[in-house]
Each structure stands twice: as C-alpha cells, then as structure tokens.
Image (cartoon, rainbow, N blue to C red):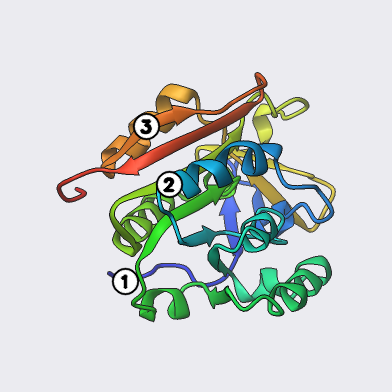
Amino acid sequence: MPISWDRPIYKLKTESGEQVLIDVTTSISPGLPPNKVIQEHIIPFFRRRGVETVLDFGAGSLRHTFPLLDARFQVCVVEFGEAFRRPKASLALQKARKHPNFSALIWPKQFIKDDRKFDAAMLNYVLQVMPKARERDTVLRYIYRKLEKDAYLLYMSRYNQMQGVIEEHKVEDGYYKWPKRKYHSFYREFTTEETHKMMSKFKFRRIRSLSERGTDQIFVYMKGKGTWI
C-alpha cells in the first residue's frame, strides 16, 4: 500500500483560501505525566490477557511508553524522525534505549518494512491531530496488520478541547490552533459514536471504556475476525 506522506509538515488551505502550515509534531506534550489509566488499568489488564509485546504508535515524548517498559513489557515506538529530534523527545529516546525491551521505528519506511506482530497497540492522542482523514484510515489499516489475532488496541483522545477556536480556522475536517505561530497544530474532535464507528470500520470491537472525566475518551478495542475493508 503506498504511503502519501512521510513528513509531519502539511501545507493546507482554509475554506476562505488562507494557506496554513501544519506540523503535527507540535502536538507533542513533553513533560506531561502518563495518564493514570496506564498504571491503574492497562498494565493489569495486559498482564491478565497475556500481552507481552506492545506497539506505541505516535509515541511522542514516550510518556506512555515508560510505564510499560518498567512493567517489563516489550515496547516498540513509532514516530516521525522529526518528532524524535525534538529536545524532550530526544532525551526520552536516549533514556528508553537503556531498556532491553525497547525498540523504535521511524514512520513510515522502517515501520512498514518491520515484520513483527504485536499483542497490543496504543494509539494515544494521535488520530485527532492528523489533518487528513484518509491518513487516519491508513494508520488503522497498518495497525490492524501489525497485530496478532485477538490482539488489543488502546485508544485515547479528548473531547471539549476546542475553546477559542473560530470558524475561520477550519481546515480539512477540523481546525488549526495557535494562529500566531509559523507552524500550527491541527485538532479534530471525534464524538464517542464517531470513534466507535471509525474503529468498527477496521474490525476493532470495543470491549472496555475507561474514561473518568467528560473530556477523556479512553477505550480498549479487540481486533476482530475477518478482514478490514
């Protein structure tokens, strides 16, 4: 399957014709602690289900990677090379490489060529910052392919995060943020219903909801039988 993008920079136009530059790596949140759901729910859940290998797609500064490494899971992270070169992410990468169970792949070529299969994948705060719908679909297709039969997918996103966004900043199916910067961030909110519909399109069946606040969307899906469309 050909990949239409291999860099995190997008040159897009708003509905009014304004040209904007989107850099999806600006959405990386260095310094934030891992979501507590990882330690409280996901690690015990993975252990009960016999999970050993985890793919962390769009890992950013690895804040959700380290708890799994410390719990002795084998974790492979995937990111753009530009994202790994950001100062906080670069430091995190150096630290993670000290773990014997850690590996990293650059998107897209290294990831596509790698032939490993994983027991679970994490897709945390990723799809909502991707400005192209067809690329979100491509990510889900590839994750499906990289997972073992009956594997799990942890999905995290946020809702009600669009305060201050104006209609003039609409681009693609979302909005760009930080208009005073040269490179903007993109954000597209998905309702719970939209999220489940998107996942079911690629044969991921929801088996657990772990959201604790109105702004969190945290779901565990299971790779279903059959093939994706």
Sequence-first tag of 1 and 3? 1
- Circles 1, 3 touching at the beta carbon (< 8 Å): no
Residue 35, quarter of picture = top right
**Position above or below: 143 against 154:** below
Q: What element carries label 1?
A: loop
Q: Residue at x 24, y 43 (%)?
A: 224
Other-residue count near label 2 (Cα within 10 Å), few / some / many at <14 / 14–19 / ≥20: many
Would you say 191 lies left or right of 97 here? left
Other-residue count near label 3 (Cα within 10 Å), few / some / many at <14 / 14–19 / ≥20: some
Choose between 22 and 122: the one closer to the eye: 122
| Residue 202's disc number | none
Question: Residue 64: x percent and y percent?
Answer: 66, 53
- Amino acid type, residue under disc 2 in the picture: Leu
- Circles 3, 2 touching at the beta carbon (< 8 Å): no
- Amino acid type, residue under disc 3 in the picture: Arg
Q: Is mark 3 on a helix, strand or loop?
A: strand
Q: What element carries label 2?
A: strand
Would you say 99 lies left or right of 209 here? right
- Amino acid type, residue under disc 1 in the picture: Pro
Residue 116, quarter of picture = bottom left
**Position above or below: 87 against 118:** below
Q: Mark 1 points at which residue?
A: 2
Q: Mark 3 points at which residue?
A: 206
Choose between 52 and 150: the one closer to the eye: 52
**Position above or below: 111 against 30:** below
| Residue 153's disc number | 2
Which quarter of the rendering shows the N terminus?
bottom left
Sequence-first tag of 1 and 2? 1
Residue 210, quarter of picture = top right
